[in-house]
Image (cartoon, rainbow, N blue to C red):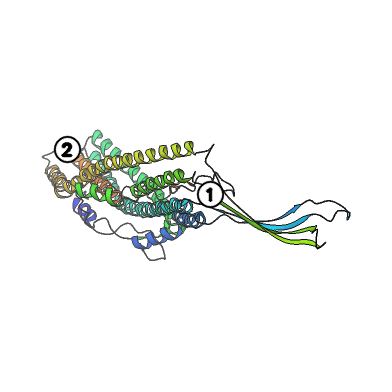
């Protein structure tokens, strides 16, 4: 008589490797997947473009206003009866004073720092999502292996119970119980197969390569889980989180905007020079006076517009940015505490299942099975022990999966989803000029 044996099950749980999808291509490693994701993920390209745009706006912010070149004419009349009239050209230049160009450039330099932090954050999001999905695929494929073995053993138990029922050694309730258990395991197996298909599709989307969905993965879940310290995790998060660094850079940018707004009412210098040809004839010579030069200079006076509203708005934005940095620090600490609790709970649970619960469940099942063979135990007791063993095997894999996912999130500074659009940085921040010459 064939019976369920747990030795094969425990060997399956401890054995490295995973269910390989038949493919002519060699297995792909986590490092290769990460490289593909950084190359092909559109969010990483968008974040890099954000840095280039910020650098370009920094160069533009330091540019001087364009000069104005034009024609001037006075006392112009039609006909030849009056020979008077002046025709000429002029050049006008606005010269910003008070360091406004330097301060405007400083605003966008802070935007560059913010955009670089956003780019780092997006890279972490992409890498974190790839790693989480990679281990999720491995764990789900391992779960499929275990469930296939369990479903096969349950199906075999159905046949054994049917034979016992036919000879009167088992009751019909016993047969119905094991038949229900076999069907339940088949449903779990089907759910896991659908789940791994979805996870592989997600991995292909993250890397931008559709063929990844059919490639075998080079890795296993038996690699030792990282040991993380709670205090170290929080300290590192607050020091190195790109999300927090971007918020702090945003605060520095708003401070630069405030400094620029305060200087906006400083007068600008306007210079204008030119030359005109005077056709009016002199009294003594009787000839045209000829070319004459002209120079004009002036400054803007902050009489009506002292940019009070612009300064108040900039200070309000600065206060809001300070509050955002504080809020984000508190939120990251809270999220880290919650994630670490999940990590530690799952880690200790997986260790307990592996070292204590599964061996005991195996022993209990083998003892009940042995006693049943000796007619010293009822078959329902064997079924209960078998179901407990099945459930403990699945719970072990679930806790192992939760531990890996939480560890990956913490190591990636809780960056978020790799297909989430990168945050936008301030594309403006330079107040409009209040003088002549247009935007500076």
Residue 314 sits in quarter: top left
Question: Would residue 83 appear left or right of 265 to someone viewing this image?
Answer: right
Q: CA distance from mark 2 to mark 1?
A: 93 Å
The crowding category of the residue bearing disc 1, from other C-alpha atoms within 10 Å (few below 14, some 14 to 19, many at least 20), is: many
Question: Would residue 345 appear left or right of 374 to someone viewing this image?
Answer: right
Res. 407 in view: no
- Considering every residue shown, the one lying at the far top of the view is 173
Q: Residue at position x 41%, y 37% from top?
A: 316
Tell which of 326 and 184 is nearer to you. Answer: 326
Q: Which residue is mark 2?
A: 381
Residue 243 on image: x %, y %: 35, 48
- Considering every residue shown, the one lying at the far front of the view is 284
Q: Residue at position x 15%, y 48% from top?
A: 359
Q: Secondary structure at mark 2?
A: helix
Q: Are marks 2 and 1 in contact (CB under 8 Å)?
A: no
Res. 135 in view: yes
Residue 178 on image: x %, y %: 26, 39
Dot 2 or dot 1: first in sequence order is 1
Q: Which residue is mark 1?
A: 268
Which mark identifies residue 389? none
Residue 380 sits in quarter: top left
Residue 80 on image: x %, y %: 88, 56
Question: Would residue 381 appear left or right of 253 to someone viewing this image?
Answer: left
Tell which of 20 and 130 is nearer to you. Answer: 130
Residue 327 on image: x %, y %: 32, 39
Q: Is residue 88 above or below residue 348?
A: below
Q: Residue at position x 19%, y 47% from top?
A: 231
Q: Secondary structure at mark 1?
A: loop
């Amino acid at each position: 008589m064939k019976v369920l044996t747990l030795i094969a099950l425990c060997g399956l749980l401890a054995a490295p490797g995973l269910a390989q999808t038949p493919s002519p291509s060699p297995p792909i490693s986590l490092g290769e997947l990460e490289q593909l994701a950084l190359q092909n993920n559109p969010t990483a390209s968008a974040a890099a473009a954000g840095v280039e745009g910020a650098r370009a706006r920094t160069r533009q912010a330091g540019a001087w206003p364009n000069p104005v070149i034009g024609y001037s004419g006075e006392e112009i009349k039609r006909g030849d009866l009056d020979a008077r009239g002046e025709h000429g050209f002029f050049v006008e230049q606005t010269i910003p004073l008070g360091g406004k160009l330097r301060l405007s450039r400083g605003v966008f330099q802070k935007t560059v720092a913010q955009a670089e932090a956003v780019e780092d954050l997006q890279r972490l999001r992409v890498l974190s999502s790839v790693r989480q999905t990679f281990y999720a695929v491995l764990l789900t494929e391992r779960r499929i292996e275990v469930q296939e073995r369990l479903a096969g053993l349950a199906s075999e138990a159905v046949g054994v119970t049917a034979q016992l029922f036919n000879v009167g050694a088992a009751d019909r309730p016993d047969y119905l119980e094991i038949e229900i258990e076999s069907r339940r395991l088949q449903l779990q197996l089907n759910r896991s197969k659908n789940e791994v298909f979805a996870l592989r599709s997600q991995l292909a989307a993250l890397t931008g390569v559709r063929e990844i969905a059919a490639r075998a993965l080079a890795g296993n879940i038996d690699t030792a889980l990282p040991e993380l310290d709670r205090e170290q995790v929080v300290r590192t998060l607050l020091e190195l989180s790109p999300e927090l660094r971007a918020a702090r850079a945003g605060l520095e940018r708003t401070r630069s905007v405030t400094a620029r707004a305060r200087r906006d009412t400083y007068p600008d210098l306007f210079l204008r020079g030119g030359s005109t040809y005077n056709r009016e004839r002199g009294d003594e010579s009787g000839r045209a006076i000829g070319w004459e030069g002209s120079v004009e200079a002036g400054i803007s006076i902050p009489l009506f517009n002292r940019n009070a509203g612009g300064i108040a708005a900039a200070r309000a934005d600065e206060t809001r940015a300070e509050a955002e940095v504080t809020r984000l620090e508190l939120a990251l600490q809270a999220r880290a505490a919650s994630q670490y609790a999940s990590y530690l709970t799952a880690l200790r649970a997986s260790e307990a299942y592996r070292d204590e619960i599964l061996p005991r469940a195996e022993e209990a099942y083998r003892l009940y099975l042995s006693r049943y063979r000796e007619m010293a135990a009822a078959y329902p007791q064997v079924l209960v022990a078998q179901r407990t063993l099945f459930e403990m095997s699945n719970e072990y894999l679930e806790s192992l999966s939760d531990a890996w996912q939480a560890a990956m999130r913490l190591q990636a500074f809780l960056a978020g989803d790799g297909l989430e659009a990168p945050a936008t940085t301030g594309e403006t921040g330079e107040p409009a000029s209040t003088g002549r010459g247009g935007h500076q």
